Image (spheres, rainbow, N blue to C red):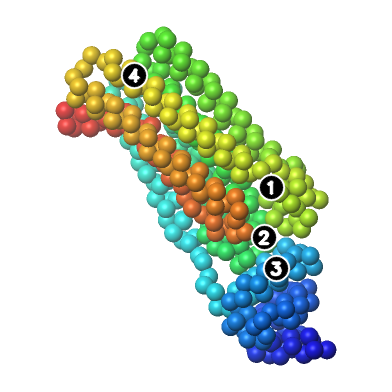
Amino acid sequence: MRLVALIVLWCSLLGFGLAQLPPGTPSCTLPCFIKGVASSPCGTNATCLCADSGFASSLLDCVQTTCEVEDILRLKNATSTACGLPVQDVAAQYSIISHTLTALVFVFVTVRIVYKQFLTSLGLGADDWVIIVVAALVIPSSALNSRIAASGVGRDIWTLTPVQITDFGICLWTITLLYYIEIALLKISILLFYLRVFPQQNFRRVVWATLAFTACFGLAFSLAQIFKCWPISYDWRQWNDRGSINGQGPGGKCVSTIAVARSHGIIGIALDVWMLLLPLQKVRELKVSSKRKLAIASMFAVGTFVTVVTVVRLAYLVIFANSNNPTYDYTALLVWSTIEIATGVICACMPALRLILAKIWP
């Protein structure tokens, strides 16, 4: 009776009765509230309880054994609101960055294609057609970025509906798949450019071997993304699988998403460094002035920025690995993924831009 009286008093101080906890609080959490308040040194002091990490921890441990995942998220939302915690929402900024970078991609690709097709006798090569495919894939990626913003990216997961969380998972799965494909195609486009401008057979053999490895790299990680969970739909349903532990639950099983993403990032960085070193040796052999060699080498060296972006993106994977709030924490990772694609396209267009600038400023 003492515990019941205590929780009734505490609830009344917060402005709601025993029959009605904070709006949106699941009824399954009531025994956990009673247990938590009884063990907290705060007693019925609402302000103290909001700041008591021990109370929050014991409440969470309790509800994880008595409530479904949806109920736990609803509890988090209700208590955050009752305690006056700030609401995080950067979805609008995410959309602006995404659409701005998408526009940049199309500007650079359009300038490259128009110049080579209509203003020179060069015509379009295989590298140009591949970059056109990348630009085409950016369209659904941009559309998905808009949809994932509406589904909750940049917002706290506990403020979202179950439908929004599931839709976020579907969008994230698809965006990641497109990312793996786009990254591989970007590298292939650059390698095809090497094949077009460097005629030496030994060098071409090395480039062809690198191209074959890159194609396998893209295919392997695309398939890994598709089949990393079984059934495939468990990838975006596991969040609500109460028995799921490390991707293994009653509804399905998954390999580690973070392990796949980290492996992709590490191999991608190694490929970037290798592809940067490949042409620099050939530039040294060119029979042109030192100033010209420096200009050409600088053009290739711009690719190092893409590598830096990849490293930054890889660092954000560490944050996501231990995240309890993926819809918010994943925002930075998605932004850097979009930046990586955009800068990759810009770097792939640099040779054409150099020719344009050379005509304007000989």
Q: CA distance from mark 1 to mark 2?
A: 15 Å
**Percent x, y for residue 231?**
75, 43
Q: Which residue is mark 2?
A: 163
Closer to the N terminus: mark 4 or mark 1? 1
Q: Which residue is mark 4?
A: 281
Q: CA distance from mark 3 to mark 2?
A: 23 Å
Q: Residue at x 65, y 90 (%)?
A: 13
Q: Residues within 10 Å of mark 1 (few under 14, many from 20)?
A: many
| Residue type of the residue flagged with mark 4 | Gln
| Residue type of the residue flagged with mark 3 | Leu
Q: Residues within 10 Å of mark 4 (few under 14, many from 20)?
A: few
Q: Residue 60 bears which disc, if any? A: 3
Asked if residue 12 lies left or right of residue 250, the reply is left
Q: Residue 102 bears which disc, if any? A: none
Residue 293 versus residue 70 in the image, above or below: above
Closer to the N terminus: mark 3 or mark 2? 3
Q: Which residue is mark 1?
A: 235
Identify the element where label 3 is drawn.
Answer: helix
Q: Residue at x 68, y 62 (%)?
A: 162
Eye-nearest disc, 4 or 3: 3
Eye-nearest disc, 1 or 2: 1
Pick whichever, 355 or 39, lies toward us.
39
Q: Are marks 2 and 4 in contact (CB under 8 Å)?
A: no
Q: Are marks 3 and 2 in contact (CB under 8 Å)?
A: no
Eye-nearest disc, 2 or 4: 4
Identify the element where label 2 is drawn.
Answer: helix
**Percent x, y for residue 268?**
50, 33
